[in-house]
């Protein structure tokens, strides 16, 4: 199905083609009317637009336009005399038309014009700004990203009111046509990094972008790494701090997490609360985190190695207890250690996936 072909000049042919491409989908609404003596149609997607906004800002002003000679004069009058919406992209082909319709825009087409006018009147339901669920803090802001891209962009812009902050919109996903926002401070990001990221995004040829996992493999380093070179955050304040440091962020429409490029290993032990405490206390807490990480990683292996190969390092009483317990144990020390780690992962996964009380 070729959707990149331009619109027809005939209104009837345009409506027929729209119905054919959409397969007669019931949520594609086509409202035909006459304004300025020209036959027009206003297209929108049911459930994606605000009924009150489209009535007050679009229907009422457009239907009161005086008679015009042709559709070109009508569109010129709308562009020059009426401020129906602050976001008014032009539509030249059916691919762009359906992308805007499914993004909550209303599109106006007219007899004798091979292009359309789009108006941003989004009104779909979305989750409000809430406290982040996975990155808690004590003294920082309690706002987290939502699934709506414009809301996430506004949260960043509220915190960084500088023209040096650049937000570029790119569309990825052959079927989903997902909006993605590339955020960076143009005075701090190396040009090579931006070039590499843009080349990586150009390689994305997936049918849909439904989570950060669809994007991160393309922007990570190609060589094998134990730790990921990209990170995620659902906190606007954390993301702004990364942008100030010269990082690049990718916001994806429909996902309440931002991808941060690049990520350092030490950032896994840092929080925004560190900057609200005394330096000495912050250093103590960070070293405590590093210590806890090393214990959780090395303790099972160290325990297994000592019991199996260096029992002389153990206290005699503890050693006798271990010997007595091993006589009746059905598994070896190594198998028990691996089994405990496996059970911990199962319990952790179950805790994440189990239904939560409302």
Image: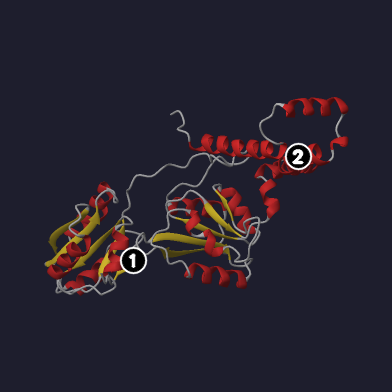
Q: Position of residue 239 (x, y in %)?
A: 58, 53
Question: Where does the N terminus fall, quadrant-wise?
Answer: bottom left
Give the residue displayed 69% in from the left and 46% down from the top. Answer: 269
- The residue that mark 1 highlights is 89
Residue closest to the eye, 213 or 190:
213
Q: Is residue 280 left or right of residue 333?
A: right
- Marks 2/1 in contact by CB < 8 Å: the verdict is no
Q: Position of residue 254 (x, y in %)?
A: 42, 51
Label for residue 304?
2
Q: Is residue 198 above or below residue 324?
A: below
Q: Is residue 107 left or right of residue 210?
A: left
Give the residue displayed 30% in from the left and 51% down from the top. Answer: 48
Residue closest to the eye, 237 or 355:
355
Q: Is residue 306 left or right of residue 91?
A: right
Q: Position of residue 181 (x, y in %)?
A: 48, 60
- Count of numbered marks: 2
Label for residue 337?
none
Give the residue displayed 19% in from the left and 74% down from the top. Answer: 8
Residue closest to the eye, 56 or 96:
96
Of badges 2 and 1, nearer the viewer stands 2
Q: Is residue 163 visible?
A: no
Q: Residues within 10 Å of mark 2 (few under 14, many from 20)?
A: some
């Amino acid at each position: 199905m070729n959707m990149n072909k331009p619109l027809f000049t005939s209104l009837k042919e345009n409506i027929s083609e729209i119905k054919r491409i959409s397969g007669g989908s019931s949520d594609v609404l086509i409202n035909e009317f006459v304004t300025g003596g020209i036959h027009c149609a206003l297209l929108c997607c049911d459930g994606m637009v605000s009924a009150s906004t489209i009535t007050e800002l679009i229907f009422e002003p457009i239907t009161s336009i005086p008679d015009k000679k042709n559709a070109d004069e009508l569109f010129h009058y709308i562009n020059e005399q009426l401020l129906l919406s602050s976001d008014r992209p032009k539509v030249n082909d059916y691919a762009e038309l359906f992308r805007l319709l499914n993004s909550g825009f209303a599109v106006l087409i007219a007899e004798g014009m091979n292009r359309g006018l789009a108006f941003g009147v989004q009104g779909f339901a979305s989750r409000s700004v809430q406290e982040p669920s996975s990155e808690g803090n004590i003294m920082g802001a309690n706002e987290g990203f939502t699934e709506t891209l414009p809301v996430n962009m506004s949260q960043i812009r509220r915190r960084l009111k500088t023209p040096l902050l650049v937000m570029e919109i790119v569309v990825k996903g052959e079927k989903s046509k997902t909006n993605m926002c590339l955020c960076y401070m143009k005075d701090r990001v190396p040009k090579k990094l931006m070039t590499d990221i843009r080349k990586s995004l150009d390689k994305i040829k997936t049918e849909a972008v439904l989570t950060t996992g669809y994007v991160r493999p393309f922007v990570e380093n190609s060589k094998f790494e134990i730790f990921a070179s990209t990170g995620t955050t659902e906190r606007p304040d954390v993301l702004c701090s990364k942008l100030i440091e010269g990082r690049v962020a990718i916001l994806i429409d429909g996902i309440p997490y931002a991808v941060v490029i690049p990520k350092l290993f030490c950032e896994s032990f840092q929080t925004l609360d560190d900057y609200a405490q005394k330096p000495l206390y912050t250093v103590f807490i960070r070293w405590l985190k590093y210590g806890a990480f090393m214990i959780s990683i090395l303790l099972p292996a160290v325990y297994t190695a000592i019991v199996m190969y260096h029992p002389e390092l153990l206290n005699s009483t503890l050693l006798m207890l271990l010997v007595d317990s091993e006589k009746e144990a059905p598994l070896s020390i190594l198998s028990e250690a691996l089994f405990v780690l496996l059970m911990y992962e199962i319990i952790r996964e179950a805790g994440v996936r189990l239904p939560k009380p409302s």
